[in-house]
Image: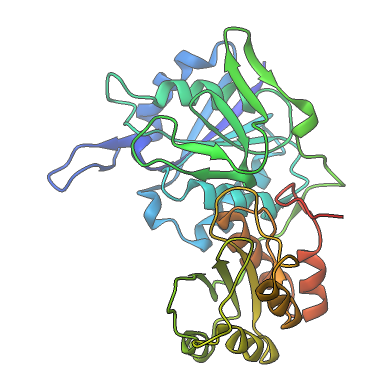
Amino acid sequence: MKKLLIINTGGTFSSVESERGLKPGLSSHELLDAMRLVAGGIELEMEDLLLVDSANIFPDDWSRLAVRICEAAKGYQGVVVIHGTDTMAYTASMLSFMLQNVPIPVVLTGSQLSISHPVADAMENCRCAVHMAASGRAGVFLAFNRKVMLGVRASKVRTMSFDAFESINYPDVAQISSLGLNIRSEYLPKAKGDLKLCTSYSDRVFLLKMYPGIRPELLRVLEAQGYQGVYIEAFGLGGLPFLKNDFLSAVQKSVDHGMTIVVGSQCRYEGSSLSVYETGLKALNSGVLQAYDMTAEAAVTKLMWVLGQTEDRQKIQWFFSRNLVQEVQIPV
């Protein structure tokens, strides 16, 4: 019999009503009986790691979670992580980097309604997550609304719909239909060695979205505050202004001062290509790195993770020129 570990971190899935609104309150003991209803012949064990709204998940929690999953990989055939939806894509992305070559399925899931609600989506999401975790297909995944996405490609795109998550610029790796759980093996990550736990990170990373009229002095403020890296969501294919408010010159100075700047697109789909327009080419010449078709969640967490591994500029560039965990498609 396959044995899975369910790690509960809180979120809407385990929420209860309170005078101040919904808040995580159901313990693993209270959730386990409900989850066994969808597990069939799979043995489940459950534990609480956190009981928080996912807005209160922080990078040190990612490290704790990665360490616990690494330990669990020795005694369980899969892990399901119950997580709030608001930051679940960030957690799934960071776990993908921290758990290099994870040998078992690690599946994050949550819900838009508490499992205690009679019409909640929690049970269906749980069913999908449990059976993906029992599939033997290694990797970090996110299960929601009867589909399974690669964790590093998932993004929350709707606030209230049960179809809250999409796989961005990458196919779903599995779906549940009347034929059961259909896994698309060709899109699964491929291990390149033994499990390697890499939990170091830098929390001195900033996410900056461009808008017309943004002041370039902002980068100097970030430098003064000790930020090591900035992910810029630029216009279109990766455009940054260089007339009037000359943001490109400020980028050049920050790169010269040792800051790592990664540039992607504000557009959710299809990604950046800085080599098309003059403004993008100027950015490349200033020394920025390119996000290509990464999600914002993947770009931010990869930047945090890479800066935790090294401060050497050449090594940082090497990491961003590689597709490590299917997070990016880099044009040839």
Tell me the residue at 70%/91% (across/down). 256
Residue 95 visible? The answer is yes
When asked about the image quadrant of residue 13, the answer is top left
Extreme residue in the top direction: 178
Residue at (82%, 39%) from the top-left corner? 190
Q: Which of 84 and 277 is in front in this view?
A: 277
Task: Answer left or right for 270 relative to 33.
Answer: right
Up/down of 110 relative to 180, above or below: below
**Closest to the observer: 99 or 273?**
273
The picture quadrant where one finds residue 246 is bottom right
Task: Give above or below for 41 relative to 201.
Answer: above
Residue that extends furthest to the left in the rendered view of this protein: 19
Q: In which quarter of the image is residue 19?
A: top left
Which residue occupies 61% across, 55% down?
298
Between 162 and 21, the one nearer to me in the picture: 162
Q: Is residue 200 visible?
A: no
Q: Residue 14, how many percent across, how many down?
A: 35, 35
Q: Residue 257, how many percent across, how many down?
A: 66, 92
Image position, residue 254 (x, y; %): 62, 88
Q: In which quarter of the image is the N terminus?
A: top right
Q: Position of residue 102 (x, y in %)?
A: 74, 43
Q: Relative to residue 147, is residue 187 drawn left or right?
A: right
Which quadrant of the rendered structure holds the C terminus? bottom right
